[in-house]
Structures are given as structure tokens and as C-alpha cells.
Amino acid sequence: MDFIASANKAIVQLQPYQPGKPSDELERELGLTRISKLASNENPLGPSEKINTCLGQAFQDLTRYPDGSANQLKQKLSELHQVEIDQITVGNGSNDVLELVARVFLGPGTQAIVAQHSFVVFSLVTLALDSQLTIVPAVNYGQDLSATLAAVTPRTKMIFIANPNNPTGTWLTEKAMREFLDALPGHVIVVLDQAYFEYVVESDYPDGIALSREYPNLVVTRTFSKAYGLASLRLGYAISHRDIADLMNRIRQPFNVNNMALAAAMIALDDQDYVNKSVQLNTAGMAQLSAMASELGLQVIPSVGNFLCVDFGREAGPIYDGLLREGVIVRPVGLYELPSFLRVTIGTAEENLHFFAALKKVLDKQ
Ligand SMILES: *Cc1c(COP(=O)(O)O)cnc(C)c1O
């Protein structure tokens, strides 16, 4: 049986997602004990201590299915964001809701638009659904909104925007977003991924959920994986027009969010101190890493996320390998058409210093 020949062409042609290298894999391979994982934009603080207590209770309930409607969490999110409960769709990570919204609107004969260097999950879900993917060239590594508008055709169903974008860290102002949304035909869905929302301190950075009150074609996604420090539990959500949420919820797996995640999220949303601490650590770490890069004469892409793309001016693969041997895992971004860059997640002050020392060693040797 030739299973490949009989499979969906769109799936056969997909390039699988490449996650950051896990620490224990590097430990196994090189026998290193001190490892700084700065590869997946995780929160370096570790989870909020308050979460330990609630997980004990969720652990007692492991034999039971979770609340498939995520009722308590949705209640809390609806108060926090001042939206109705029926506008919320929960997901097994925000990647799950990105896929759900794509499945509602995309398929053969449709078109979706993404920016060059933008988050790879957008193109993955589009291509998997056999929808046509249009990639708009970036300006200064960021999304060119006028070129994005110009790329719209009668078949365009969806435009994906990550604000800020991963891996570049580039971002769009509220004014730019409004001008774009005003000019866009209302039948085109804009998926605005705000995974790093909590980290952004710039005053003209838009709150997508506030914008979605004026633009019903806007679907905003958020996550507990970054500033809330819960990447492993897998929990994200979308806020949208209720009719879109209704369709997304029809195809959502009934128990796509587990008990532990639901319990932890309730605590995490109340632990604003933890989020503030995470943001402060990130802002300080961003300054620290930027200073290190400039000390080494390296350019960076200005970033408002919890990561920074550093330009080595040449193929960055050997530098990535050298850093691995020093116990520092960063992320190659050749897949994103940024072959001379490495993406570095902001770590603790100590991890950032580990990266700096390792990088100096690697650059000296090469
Ligand atoms: C990290 C990240 C996410 C979060 O994904 P989860 O599935 O919620 O863990 C979403 N979008 C972007 C752009 C990201 O970088």
C-alpha cells in the first residue's frame, strides 16, 4: 500500500513544525549539566507558586472529564475583557484556536494572507486545509499593511497578523491597525494573534479585544503560555463575534482543555503580581541582551516580545551549534527566511549572562 500516494496532497506537502530543542535532549547528547533553554519564548520565572496548591485538587479529579464548556474560566475571562461568554472559544493552546478559526473559513478555492517572517503556524494551518497561501513581503522585518491590503482578492477569506510577531518581535500601532481595518472589506476575517500582549509596554500598542468591539471581523487570540508561564498545560483562547465563536465551538473537541489547565488559569488570572514580575524581568532582560549584542557589534531587530532576533551577518547555523556545545539553546530561524539570525528568548539575568559568555566564546573560536 502506498499510503503517501493516497493521502491528502496538501498534507503530504507540509513541512512539519520544528520545536525548540528540549533541554533533556541536549543533556543526553552532550552530557552537559548547566543548560539555559532560550529557544521557545517560555517564561523563565517558572510558574506562579500559587498554582501548586490548586493543581493538587485538579489531580484528585484526574479520573473525571474536565468541564467541556470551561464555564468558570469563560466567566472570569468575560469579566476581565468585558465580553460576553458566547464570544469566547478555548483551545489546547492558542495554536488550537488558530486552527479552529482557519477550519471554519478556509478550504480549497479560498485564499489566506500572511506576512513574510510571520509565525509559521499561520501558514501550516492554511496549507493543511488546501487553501491558497499568499505571503506578503515584509518591510523592516515587519508586516506591510498596505501591501497586505493590496493582496486581497475576492477569494481572500482570512488575514493573519501576529502583533507582536514571532520570531521578529516587530509590532503594529493602534493607528496602523485601525487604518488597515477601516480599509479592509468587512467579509475578510482578520486573525490577530496577541500571544505576547502582556509583555508589550508601548503606549500606542493596540488592545485587540477593544478593537474587536468596533470591527466584528476581528478574531483575537491570547495565551497562557507566555507571560502567565503555563506553556506546558496548553491553554489559549479566542475572543470574536459570537457567530464566529459559535462556529469554532461546533468543531472544537469537547474536552480540548484539561482540568489542570482550567484550574491553573483561574489562579493565574488573579495573580497579577506574577505577570508584573514577568514583565519587569523581561524588560530588564531585553535591555541586558540588547546591550550585550551591541557590545559585540551585532545588530538586532527591535522587539517588544520576550525574545530578540540577533543578526550575525552570515549563516547562523555554526553559531547555533557552538552555543549548544556551551549548553545554551536558542532558535535558528532559517525557516523564516532569516538565515543569518538566531532568536534568543529573554531569560533570567543569570541565563542571559550564560548566553553572553557562551556567545563570546563561540565567536572567538569562529
Ligand atoms: C508562542 C506563540 C503562541 C502561543 O501558542 P500556544 O499554543 O498558546 O502555546 C501563539 N502565537 C505566537 C505568535 C506565538 O509566538
Image (cartoon, rainbow, N blue to C red):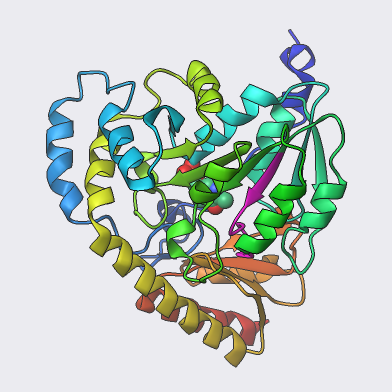
Asked if the magenta segment contains residue 168, the reply would be yes
Residue 83 seen: yes
Residue 7: % across, % down: 73, 15
Q: How many marks?
A: 0
Q: Which residue extends farthest top?
A: 1
Image quarter (top left, top right, bottom left or bottom right) of the C terminus: bottom right
Residue 196: % across, % down: 49, 57
Q: Is residue 137 left or right of residue 285?
A: right
Image quarter (top left, top right, bottom left or bottom right) of the N terminus: top right
Q: Is residue 288 left or right of residue 43?
A: right
Is residue 99 placed above or below 107 in the rendered structure?
A: below
Residue 354: % across, % down: 43, 78
Residue 136 seen: no
Q: Residue at x 20, y 25 (%)?
A: 62
Res 73 → quadrant: top left
Residue 49: % across, % down: 18, 56
From the viewer's side, name the closer residue of 112 and 258: 112
Q: Residue at x 21, y 47 (%)?
A: 267
Highlighted range, magenta: 159-172
Is residue 161 placed above or below 173 in the rendered structure?
A: above
Is residue 167 placed above or below 155 in the rendered structure?
A: below
